[in-house]
Amino acid sequence: MEKNKVTIEVVAAKAGVGIATVSRAINNMGGISPKTKAKVLAAVEELGFVPNSNAQNLKLRQTKQIALAVPDIRNAFIPEIAYSVEQAAKYFDYRVVQINTLGNVRSELEVLRDIKKLHVDGLIILPLAYPKTLKDLINKSKLPISIINYGKKLDSDTKADIVSLSTQEGKLAMEHLISIGRTRIAYAGAQKEIIEERFFAYEDALDHVDPSLVYFGEDFSLQTGARAADHFVNLAHMPDAIYAGNDMVAIGLLNRFKELGIRVPEDIAIVGIDNNILCAITTPKLSSVSIMGSEVAKVATELLLQRIQEQKIGLYERVQFEPRLFVRESSLARTRTTQYIE
Amino acid sequence: MEKNKVTIEVVAAKAGVGIATVSRAINNMGGISPKTKAKVLAAVEELGFVPNSNAQNLKLRQTKQIALAVPDIRNAFIPEIAYSVEQAAKYFDYRVVQINTLGNVRSELEVLRDIKKLHVDGLIILPLAYPKTLKDLINKSKLPISIINYGKKLDSDTKADIVSLSTQEGKLAMEHLISIGRTRIAYAGAQKEIIEERFFAYEDALDHVDPSLVYFGEDFSLQTGARAADHFVNLAHMPDAIYAGNDMVAIGLLNRFKELGIRVPEDIAIVGIDNNILCAITTPKLSSVSIMGSEVAKVATELLLQRIQEQKIGLYERVQFEPRLFVRESSLARTRTTQYIE
DNA sequence: ATCTTTATTGGAAACGTTTCCTGAACCAAC
DNA sequence: GTTGGTTCAGGAAACGTTTCCAATAAAGAT
């Protein structure tokens, strides 16, 4: 690897000054005459000197890095979040280390447990589940943490800034389906343990839950959607609307229904959640509720970095973003159906 | 930030040994009796000691981190690559720092120029363009670099491992369109400077290029596809097939054609490139050529980390991955069209 | 019992910065 | 020309490891 041995000392020698002076010059601090400063900077330039960040960080007790732990960068709205975090961090001159927890609760806890080994100044985590251990580990941790809260209310005494993706998106979706006159509404998503709120919203919106209208798959994927479609189709009494736990599931439903010759929204209306880029390109276009992922990521990052820089302790923020409903073809009201059918 | 002041010295005191012994214990090196080792490890456990990586790295002259510079994590097959890199790096106990160059050539060069400031042991870069400066900067750099080569042949004297996403994917796509009997084939993509090979494959596959059948948009996006569709529709003599520079463009075409009442593949066949997850969920399903992104990313990462660990110098690898064609509905041959139309 | 050899151990230097603190140099004012 | 106050510069300590090297203890050979 043959690193350049250009250290601050070499620069000092070249410029004919002491190392302290070089340090002052490159960090442009006061207490140095413009003339020597220029001299030093010239030497820096000529030698191509770059301060060794390990040494700097060792001395300054920081790393200028934060970690971003997400379930899986390949999923739905995560790239958007990763992007948003990276951009916000860059503004503070911070780098982002990427960690995929792989939808594995154990590895989420591991991240927190080994957080010191991570070699970062702070952590942004988007947890999949919220076992009691999670809060304990967070509260025990000395590191600033921002949580991007996905669906579940966290105990208020959690020692972290929490930016919540709305917990109302399910309600919004359900209200929408009801408002367009659907009465037999189904739910499709992963087992409720993963993102409970999504399913609770379903229960809450209905007087009575028909168990046959609830389909729990393994995950929030296209496959889950396809299997859910098969399940609903085989019912004696099919639903007339489906609230899908996320867009991938919704698209899985859409596809399978198309293959089965079931019309959306005439036979069944569908609403997804996340409002990802795919919604606009499915057939029919998918109605969806946006949870404002990139805005949330930005705020979570800013809170974290402010906390780090100000060495703020306690006074944890709670920010809640409101969801937005985007009505597209998959949930047009029946009275307007003719506009859609060509 | 109130760091734990648990240093190796505290552990040494607790265990009643010297600091050198502690170091030997935690890095399980030889020359230490099992008994003392156990004693030290117990103290480590009890105090929750975690070695300060800045100090370690300063001493060892490494960072245990690599940077991944991609145009934009939100685009098409990039998340897959980022994921693959992270997983491969984890295997070597390395972390990945994420950088989005934002499709900006200048910022790509900046990454290379400031590579020392990046505080990493190596770099994986997926460049958008290949100005002469790029090679110069790479060759001048002392840091190990793996290039994920996207479409353009690099000079063979580039001092980096190069893993190439195939340059034959365009050829494959064109041959496919020709094989299903299409004669008036168009191209849609970004201006040719960005990924030249994609367009060159188009030129190479044809005896004569009709300029009206070539549409260059600003980028490889849905919008570019939509605009291309408008362009082709207004032609006196429409194409009967389109080779799209990537899937997003292809999907943009697909959508706009649907709105315009033009049938795919009956009126116009379409083939995209990347074979991303969307291909299976469009209507009609999109034929596409996969460039094997995650395999490429894995190999690029492994080469980089091997180079780092073995301190290998010179002997740069060139790996080429072959593309794979996935035929779906958007490019079914006309004789089989009836199978598709319901 | 004495002398080698081997297995463990601890002290101290080094990695490359930042920063405290002391010292020199300069200037103005008496 | 001495004094007092600024301003600027440099030496050295400290950050928390790893590792060389010397030292000690244990063990084996004579």
Image (spheres, coloured by chain):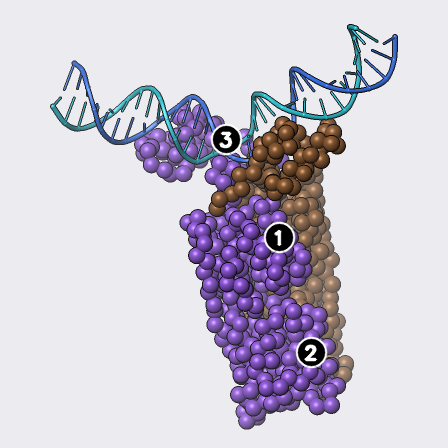
Chain colours: A brown, B purple, C blue, D cyan
Task: Please tell me which residue lies in front, A154 or B194.
Answer: B194
Q: CA distance from mark 1 to mark 2?
A: 32 Å
Q: Residue at x 59, y 89 (%)?
A: B182
* Residue located beneath label 2 in the image: B215
- Across and down, in percent, residue B221 comes to 67, 70
SS assignment at label 2: strand
Quarter of the C terminus of chain A within the rendering: bottom right
* Residue located beneath label 3 in the image: B7
Q: CA distance from mark 1 to mark 3?
A: 35 Å
Classify mark 2: residues with Cα within 10 Å, few (<14), some (14-19) or many (20+): many
SS assignment at label 3: loop
Mark nearer the viewer, 3 or 2: 2
Amino acid type at mark 1: Val
Please give the label number shown on residue B111.
1
- Across and down, in percent, residue A69 comes to 57, 52
Residue A194 visible in the current orientation: no
Chain for disc number 2: B
A19 relative to A324 in the view: left or right: left
Vertical position of residue B120 compared to residue B251: above or below: above
Q: Are marks 3 and 2 on the same chain?
A: yes
Chain for disc number 3: B
- Across and down, in percent, residue B204 comes to 57, 80
Q: Which is nearer the N-term, disc 1 or disc 2?
A: 1
Q: Residue at x 49, y 75 (%)?
A: B324
